Image (cartoon, rainbow, N blue to C red):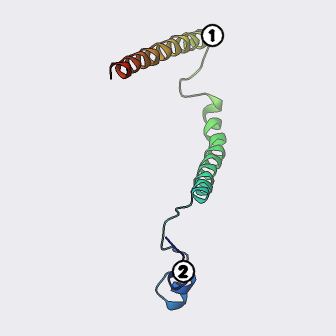
């Protein structure tokens, strides 16, 4: 899309056909889209960071599970070990099946 001075944002504002602060075309530039998404993600992370402190201060720092002791921590560790093992096994089997399908073609 070429630049047309008659259709520029300022020309439309002067003519009274555009509203102030509203762009007529979406952002099509890669770096500008990246900057816009980076700004949105940064704003979201800052909002979460500011909301985290009051959320964790509720109930004296006790989490959703309740009071934790050594048995709870040990069981959570075992769940992590089993979970990562199942994840790696499942993804390896999926990759093997996809590779086998690719070689059949």
Q: Decide: few, some or many residues near mark 2? Use Cα within 10 Å; few <14, some 14-19, many ≥20.
A: few
- Looking at the image, which residue is at 59% across and 49% down? 41
37 to the left or right of 90 = right
- Looking at the image, which residue is at 54% across and 80% down? 8
Could you tell me which quadrant the C terminus lies in?
Answer: top left
Q: Is residue 53 above or below residue 7?
A: above
Residue 25 at what x, y percent from top left?
48, 70
Mark 2 to mark 1: distance in Å? 67 Å
- Judged from this view, the residue extending furthest toward the bottom is 15
Instruction: Give the structural element (helix, strand or loop) at label 1.
Output: helix
Which mark lies nearer to you, 2 or 1? 2
Q: Quadrant of residue 71?
A: top right
Give whichever of 70, 9 is nearer the camera.
9
98 to the left or right of 5 = left
Instruction: Give the structural element (helix, strand or loop) at label 2.
Output: loop
Residue 19 at what x, y percent from top left?
50, 81
Q: Which mark is residue 8?
A: 2
Q: Earlier in the sequence, mark 2 or mark 1?
A: 2
Residue 43 at what x, y percent from top left?
62, 52
- Looking at the image, which residue is at 65% across and 44% down? 49
Q: Decide: few, some or many residues near mark 1? Use Cα within 10 Å; few <14, some 14-19, many ≥20.
A: few
Contact, CB < 8 Å: mark 2 with mark 1? no
Q: Which mark is residue 70?
A: 1
Q: Is residue 100 above or below residue 55?
A: above
Residue 67 at what x, y percent from top left?
59, 20
Q: Is residue 51 above or below residue 24?
A: above
Q: Quadrant of residue 78?
A: top right
């Amino acid at each position: 899309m070429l630049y047309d001075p008659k259709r520029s944002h300022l020309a439309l504002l002067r003519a009274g056909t555009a509203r102030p602060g509203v762009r007529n075309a979406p952002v099509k530039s890669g770096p500008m889209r990246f900057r816009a998404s980076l700004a949105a993600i940064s704003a979201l992370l800052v909002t979460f960071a500011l909301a985290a402190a009051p959320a964790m201060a509720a109930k004296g720092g006790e989490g959703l599970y309740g009071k934790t002791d050594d048995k709870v921590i040990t069981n959570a560790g075992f769940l992590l070990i089993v979970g990562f093992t199942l994840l790696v096994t499942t993804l390896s089997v999926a990759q093997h099946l996809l590779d086998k399908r690719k070689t059949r073609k």
